[in-house]
Amino acid sequence: MNPQKSADRRSAIPRTDTLLADPRLVRAADRIGRPRVRGLVRDAQQHARDGDLLPEQVLSHVLAALPTGPTTLRPVINATGVVVHTNLGRAPLSPAAVEAMTLASGYTDVEYDLADGTRARRGRGTIDALLDAVPAAEDAHVTTNGAAALVLIATALAQGREIIVSRGELVEIGDGFRLPDLLTSTGARLREVGTTNRTHLADYAAAVGPDTGFILKIHPSNFLTVGFTSSVSVRELSGLGVPVVADIGSGLLHADPALPDEPDATQWLGAGADLVTASGDKLLGGPQAGIVLGRRDLVTVVRRHPLARAVRVGKLTLAALEATLRTPQTRVDQALHATPESQEARVRALVARLRDADVDATAVPCAGAVGGGGAPGVELPGWAVRLAPSFAAALRTGDPSVVGRLDRGFCLLDLRCVPPDADPSVAAAVLAVSRRLDGSPCT
Ligand SMILES: *Cc1c(COP(=O)(O)O)cnc(C)c1O
């Protein structure tokens, strides 16, 4: 380029102070800090110097680059039909849990007795809510997640000793994490018994000895073994004279007829488990947490172990978990139990709205899933809006972001996990994408 022209263009680039004085950037600096806004200004000026932007485009480039909210996490409308979607943050919190977190977000009496002005048991309201929900448990403890609950129990009850576990239950829970590695990382030894498909009571009985810390029963929550299989029930294991720790994973506290093969905490404690562990953000429908329920003496040992301090939950988790336990119906429950009839009516209304605007949409029956490594093989009958596949990526990157699923060459929007009051947002997102796709020559 002509050096004179290039110099002219450089001098036309708005100066940093001028840009930072723009009222919109002043407001942005109040929200996200002046250094970050200045960084975005410098980036845009550099683009202009490099010839990628015209000088008059610098300000609008900065405005477009400003973060829209206080976090880079973006809300997503989950139209996948997968209720506990790990990549989408697992359980969505109920309005009561959100309100509880807001209330607890400032100073709060999380471990303080306001009447006496003294220290109190941390999170006692949450423990009470757990014990009210599961009367079969004598005591309860909360950790940062289900994996932490297992690590804490293994450390407190079996460090330097043996955990007896069936070879059919040594599961990988996702993203390459395996329960056997997690357990042995504590310094406990695994005493594997039985085979992949069959383990008998006699296998466990033969392994019990002076080195036994506990027997671990893991619900293989993310796969099914079918055919020539057998496993030993918690009731049978509870007769072997050593503690039985049962990992139900999902977090169901009571039996759910919609999920007949999922064990629940009440059932396994009733069958004689000494401790039950579960996640807070799967079928329980609450925040990320690990839950330990069972015998008071064992919960006390676990709770008092030094490692407990390293996997302690914050006040926000305690607040959200308590509210989740007290709320009559969580959003996970609503999604799991949404009837095909109610979903069909919503899907047909949405399709009619889209067709009015000439979008090629069809109402189709589909199957949702529990997800989150829970209830493998269970299909939840529902309905979806079927769209051309080009909608999938455009809806994901739109605002609001809508994540559907691709099925046999179509983009399906399953409304099971979409709160009914968000149906108009889904319609608006599809209409916006359809206008964008119509306008672009290559789709
Ligand atoms: C999900 C799961 C875990 C891990 O729980 P996180 O809360 O994800 O740490 C452990 N065991 C089983 C059986 C699970 O399903």
Image (cartoon, helix red, strand yellow):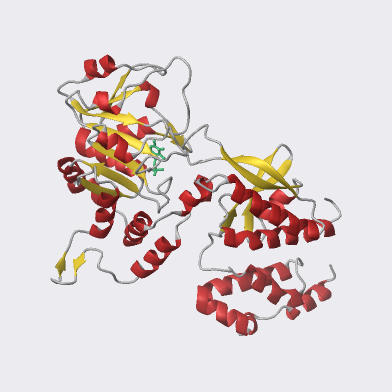
Q: Tell me which residue sits at (72%, 36%) in the image.
A: 408
User: Quarter of the image holding residue 325?
Assistant: bottom left
Would residue 51 appear left or right of 180 to someone viewing this image? right
Total marks in image: 0
Q: Nearer the viewer, residue 370 or 162?
A: 370
Q: Position of residue 365 (x, y in %)?
A: 67, 41
Compared with residue 272, is residue 109 higher up or lower down, i.e. above or below?
A: below
View quadrant of ligand 1: top left
Which quadrant of the figure has residue 257?
Answer: top left
Residue 402 placement (x, y as % from top left): 63, 55
Vertical comparison of 161 with 443: above or below: above
Q: Classify residue 11 as left or right of residue 99.
A: right
Q: Is residue 17 visible?
A: no
Residue toward you, 48 or 438? 438
Which residue sits furthest front? 341
Q: Position of residue 287 (x, y in %)?
A: 40, 54
Residue at 20% from the left image edge and 66% from the top image edge: 112
State the quadrant of the N terminus: bottom right
Rendered position, 160 above or below 67: above
- Judge from the rendering whether residue 347 lies leftward or rightward of residue 372; answer left or right: right
Is residue 348 among the parts visible in the rendering?
Answer: yes
Viewed as shown, does residue 172 lie left or right of 343? Answer: left
Between 45 and 256, which is closer to the camera in this rendering?
A: 256
Query: Which x, y percent locates residue 120?
Result: 17, 62
